Amino acid sequence: MAHVFESILGASKSFAYRCDNDEAVTMTYLAGSVQDITGCRPAQLLRNRDLSFASLCHPDDLRPMIDHVDAAIAQRAGWDVDYRLVRPDGSTAYVRERGAAVFDETGEVQYLQGLVVDASAEQHLRHKLQTQRTEALDANKDILGLANNIARSVRELSMLSVNARIEAARAGDHGRGFAVVAAEISKLADTNAQWAAMIADKISEAR
């Protein structure tokens, strides 16, 4: 049965643990893909023989992780927390831990237990989505820039239309050509203004 358990945990690249509720996160039981994820053999971590599990946690993630677990214990709830492990060779492993505390009859914590899962693929997907989102926002900025250019062109066309109408009025009968040009410029300005407004609205909706 234990062999089947190990096989399942190995196939899913995860490991089960039981540990003391202390700052070192002293491991008392480990089974599964411990070495693949942590870079350490289980024996090195059990009872902090060579190093503690806490010493593998990324310095920026250790305190938030412990605080998250402590808050869950205080509420007698389980926890689900992401953090990074720094292996002895310096490489980083992204993991996701789900666990819970086991209490005795007096309400004191006996030990913590749970499952640590390799979250590298999940982290890669998050990074990819964030990159795509950033690229989309950059593309939207470019489109908004074009919309602003159109709006500026609209203002220029509007001024040209006004000037053409003034010249047409001054020229009397000879200015009919100016009047026709002014009317067409005005229509073009109105169309461009509508397109600029539509582009800006679509980009705003997509944000």
Image (cartoon, rainbow, N blue to C red):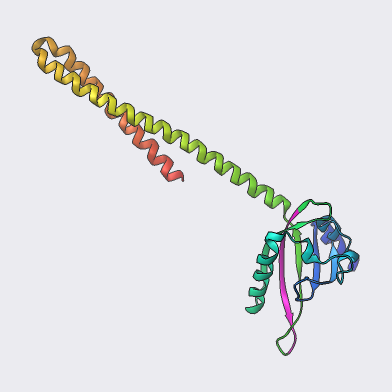
Q: Position of residue 206 (x, y in %)?
A: 46, 44
> In the displayed structure, would residue 118 be above or below residue 80?
above
> In the displayed structure, would residue 94 be above or below residue 129?
below
Horizontal relation, residue 140 to residue 15: left or right? left
Q: Residue furthest front?
A: 59
Horizontal relation, residue 10 to residue 66: left or right? right
Image quarter of residue 64: bottom right
Q: Residue furthest top?
A: 174
Q: Residue at the location (85% across, 71% down)? A: 29
Q: Residue furthest left?
A: 172
The N terminus: image quadrant = bottom right
Q: Main secondary structure of the magenta part?
A: strand
Nearest the viewer among 45 and 103 is 45
Nearest the viewer among 57 and 197 is 57
Q: Residue at the location (33% across, 29% down)? A: 152
Nearest the viewer among 55 and 29 is 55
> Does the segment drawn in magenta span residue 94?
yes
The magenta stretch is 93-105
Nearest the viewer among 23 and 95 is 23
Q: Residue at the location (66% across, 48% down)? A: 125
Q: Position of residue 18 (x, y in %)?
A: 80, 72
> Does the segment drawn in magenta span residue 50?
no
> In the displayed structure, would residue 206 be above or below residue 57?
above
> In the displayed structure, would residue 2 be above or below residue 149?
below
